[in-house]
Image: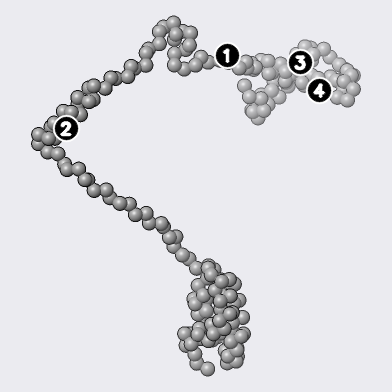
Amino acid sequence: MKLTFEEFWKKLIEHEIWYDQMKMRFFRKDLKGVANDCFIFLLASEQRWKAQDFQDFRKCYQSFLSKSPDKVSAPVLQQVETEVKKHEEPILTGEERDKKIAEWLESVKAVKMANHVPKLSRKQIAEEGDWLPKKGPTHPSTSEGELRKAFFHQYYIKHNFDPRTADKVTGWVDESKWIEDNEVELMELWTEELSRQVIKI
């Protein structure tokens, strides 16, 4: 049976209740555009098309709608109408204009200028630190020597005391002597520690 797309479309939407539901459910879809895709698909399905079963066609169309993307719609920008105010007062020229300018200058001269902010005295600057507040005391920082000493001490504890009991291990050595004996190795470890930026100076 030969049907144009428009004839197919009219028959497809004859079922008013069903079509109303489709419009509500798929309000973001291009209903007629998707129907055209469905029509082309059914034309290619020879046996299905010959049957002219519009109940089946509606199911097929519904399946197409559920899989189709939403139609692209351009955003609607709200147009704000602004009234252009007309200049109601007459434009002054000649003597009247000069007179108005003179009146305006007189009113400007009559206004007393506000006093400028007074300068700070030398004494105030010394006491208050000019316009900016005085800086507080700097946060004390640990010197590299102190950090290195603490680092060596940690290694000394690790090698000369039992970690569980805190007792001296066999072969215990006094800290200053142990550091002196292992100075080269300790310095290498210290340099490596600095390069890893674990300790920041």
Residue found at the far bottom of this picture = 1
How many numbered badges does the structure rendering display?
A: 4
Percent of width and height locating residue 105: 19, 26
Q: CA distance from mark 2 to mark 4?
A: 93 Å
Residue in view at x 77 percent, y 11 percent: 176
Residue 54 figure quarter: bottom right
The residue that mark 4 highlights is 158
In the rendered structure, which disc, 1 or 3, sits on the residue that comes first in sequence?
A: 1
Task: Classify 25 as above or below 116.
Answer: below
Q: CA distance from mark 3 to mark 2?
A: 93 Å
Percent of width and height locating residue 82: 33, 52
The residue that mark 2 highlights is 100
The reply to whether callout 3 and callout 4 are in contact (CB within 8 Å) is no
Label 4 Cα crowd, 10 Å radius (few <14 / some 14-19 / many 20+): few
Residue 51 figure quarter: bottom right
Give the structural element (helix, strand or loop) at label 3: helix
Q: Nearer the viewer, mark 3 or mark 2?
A: 2
In the rendered structure, which disc, 3 or 4, sits on the residue that comes first in sequence?
A: 4
Q: Which mark is residue 52?
A: none
Give the structural element (helix, strand or loop) at label 2: helix
Q: 61 or 114: which is nearer to us?
A: 114
In the rendered structure, which disc, 3 or 2, sits on the residue that comes first in sequence?
A: 2
Relative horizontal placement of residue 107, taking residue 13 as reference (left or right): left
Task: Classify 86 as above or below 168.
Answer: below
Amino acid tagged 3: Ile
Give the structural element (helix, strand or loop) at label 4: helix
